[in-house]
Amino acid sequence: MREEQLRRALRSLPVPDEDGARERGWRLISAASVAAEAEAGPRRGRRGGRRVAQVAVALGLLAAAAISPAGAAVRDWVGEAVEGGHEPSLPALTSLPAAGPLLVDSAQGAWVVEEDGSKRLLGSYRQSTWSPRGLFVAAVGDGELVALDPKGAIHWALPGPGAPTDPAWSPDGYRIAYLSGGAVRTVAGDGTGDHESWPRAAPVTPAWRPGRGHVLTVAESGGRLRTIDADSGRSIAVTPAGLRPSGLEWSRDGSRLLVFGRAGVEVLDRSGHPLWRRPAPSGTELVAAALALGGEGAVAVLASRGGPARSELLLVGPRGAPTSLFSGPGRLSGVSVSADGRWALLEWPTADQWLFLDLAHPQRVVAVSNISAQFAPGASSASAFPSVAGWCCQGPPPGR
């Protein structure tokens, strides 16, 4: 058996008292972080604080290594990484720091990742999305829209009049919107009643507005946004041409719409009137954005610049200067926020890592390496970096 095969075999062995070990490890990481902050004192600047964060995470990982079969490898890596200024990293995903499973799209297909880190390949699907409570998944197959459960059992498949893309499940679970042939279409959650809701749509995933009825916001050409009744096709509101959007997201209470594109972000009210706007930092473009802290206030945005490539996660809001939460070389490609609004998952293809950041305490960083290989078992060559399609699942909006 070759060394690499032996290493993989050792990593796959179950850890005695794994749940207890994991819990003790998280407590050690938190304790180490607090202790390091206290030692640093209030006068440290950003550079010093970053060093403290690295040391705190390293202390937690070294403590966890003492109860892990892969302890020696982790200790070696941490010693090198902290000195080199990189994030200390775990060799494999063994748990998620917040409740709710992940939905991940890879070259092999769509995967479900449970809270304990276990993974299940649903099939060779792409552009997957959760139903509102995680009971089902909608995904794009070979020329069809498919609804299946998290174990991979297909409930229905709908051949599209054109190639379906960009499915989005309504907050009440009774409708799925998707794009096909330059139009937006809607189908019931049981696969019936497929119809065209609006004839013109840009290639941006539609966004459902929480609340009564089935109200959907669609991007059109030129940066114009249109909000419609998806059942009747009636137009409710339309915005002037503006920011060319890459993504749309309604807040959980349906009061705010996040619109983001390469040039910046803006937040609109229910009627489409702008509440606030922020351009991308000079010399950068925005790669991704997500509503943070429950979706009612700040927005987490990924800004990327070239020459040399570098990316930064910023927390922006209607007032004050943006807060930098993380910065690293290369290109970060996506950000997802946990259902409780506390944790952000950053996708870092350059380092082949996922980074979990505690948004309330950004010095708490958990990095996981070898992400590509973990979603390409048996692959004989390097695989494309996977993308996170969703972190399930938000409960009902407040007051509902």
Image (spheres, grey):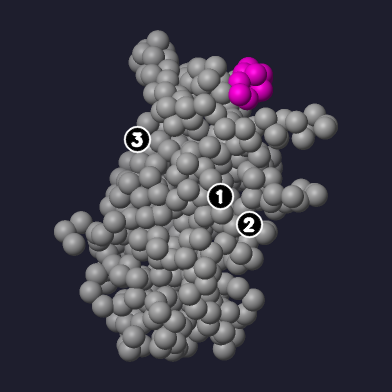
Give the Cα separation between the discs numbered 2 and 1. Answer: 12 Å
Which mark sits nearer the N-terminus, 1 or 3? 1
Q: Which residue is mark 2?
A: 106
The kind of residue on which mark 1 rests is: Lys
Q: Which residue is mark 3?
A: 360
The kind of residue on which mark 3 rests is: Ala
Between residues 367 and 292, which one lies in front from this camera angle? 367
Q: Nearer the viewer, mark 2 or mark 1?
A: 1
Which mark sits nearer the N-terminus, 2 or 3? 2
19 within the magenta span: no
Instruction: Identify the element where label 2 is drawn.
Output: loop
- Is residue 363 depicted above or below 247 in this figure? above
Left or right placement of residue 373 versus residue 225 in this view: right
In the rendered image, is residue 13 in sight?
A: yes
- Quarter of the picture holding the N terminus: top right
Using the rendered view, name the quadrant where residue 343 is placed. top left
